[in-house]
Image (tube, rainbow, N blue to C red):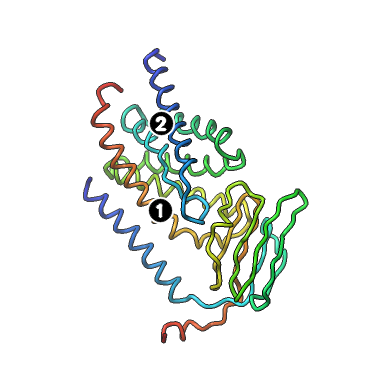
Amino acid sequence: MKKNDLYLIGGILLLVAVSFIFIQLYKSEGSKVLVTIDGKEYKTFSLNDDTVFTISQDDGKWNTFEIKDGYVKMIGASCPDKICVKHKKIHYDNETITCLPNRVVLRIIDGEDNDIDAIAD
Amino acid sequence: MSSKKIALYGLLIALAFIFSYIESLIPMPFAIPGIKLGLANLVTIIALYGIGVKESLVLSMVRILLVGFTFRDPSTLLFSFAGGILSWLSMTVTMKLFSMVGVSIIGGITHNIGQIIVAILYVNNPSLIYYLPFLLTAGVVSGALIGLLGALTIKRIKKIL
């Protein structure tokens, strides 16, 4: 290992740490989940209404997600890798669950600006 | 091309192929698209140092093509090529700057950056950029491991390459 290697590792880890701190500081609770398919807005759901919904696409692809207690979780999908189903439930503004094979993205939106409260906590 | 070289390339492609297979058997506990060990990158980096820059590109492209059609969904080929080409390019230009560990880390993170760029274009959704801090961390860890392994390996096989 050269000295440069250590600078590289340190630099990247610092960058990662700073971005995590930023994400944590500006984290706010979302109120809705936006479903997009291939970049196009499909539907928006309120996090306050518990529901189970299946997104069906014309070519037979499907994703089923559940809204419960203000959290969104993918509970089933037709994709081969099931990465989206493994994703933990999401709740905070801008958190996303992505299903690459089906081009489906669930993203939490409309977080209230309560970052000041978050810092005070 | 000498018959020794042909045999060597065949051997290395087979090795990378098997590494990819082993990797497809290991379930990753992360729910983020694109995080993996990158075992096959061990072959790419050994070729980069042991044989040559151009040869390592050929090896990694052939491997991606074969693996894409056998162990993975061919639709993931696009992601693999983007990651593979960007990481090869970045490793090549930073070889003088870092040791094998640093170069391998560069390879790991640029591989993930390439994949996330294609993923953003693929689903038409820039919010995937939020995955980047996770992908960078994963790239540093797996890149460092592969680089250390590669350095140990190349010391022992340099003479026969």
> In which quadrant of the rendered image does the C terminus of chain B lie?
top left
Q: Could you tell me the amino acid type at mark 1?
A: Ala
Give the percent coordinates (x, y) of residue A54. 72, 61
Residue A78 - label: none
> Hey, which quadrant is residue A15 in on the image?
bottom left
Q: Which residue is label 1 attached to?
A: B138
> Hey, which quadrant is residue B89 in on the image?
top left
Q: Chain of mark 2?
A: B
At a point 42% along the width and 17% down the height, the residue shown is B6
Q: Which residue is label 2 attached to?
A: B56
Asked if B128 appears above or below A23 in the picture, the reply is: above
Q: Decide which of tag 1 and tag 2 comes sooner along the chain.
A: 2
Circle nearer the viewer, 1 or 2:
1
At a point 50% along the width and 63% down the height, the residue shown is B130
- Please tell me how crowded label 2 is: few (under 14), some (14-19), or many (20+) other residues with Cα within 10 Å: many
> In which quadrant of the rendered image does the N terminus of chain B lie?
top left
> Hey, which quadrant is residue B5 in on the image?
top left
Asked if A26 appears above or below B59 in the picture, the reply is: below
Q: Secondary structure at mark 1?
A: helix
Asked if A39 appears above or below B57 in the picture, the reply is: below
Give the percent coordinates (x, y) of residue B126. 57, 60
Number of callouts in the render?
2
Q: Could you tell me the amino acid type at mark 2?
A: Ser
Left or right: A69 as drawn, with respect to B95: right
Give the percent coordinates (x, y) of residue B77. 57, 39
Give the percent coordinates (x, y) of residue A102. 66, 52
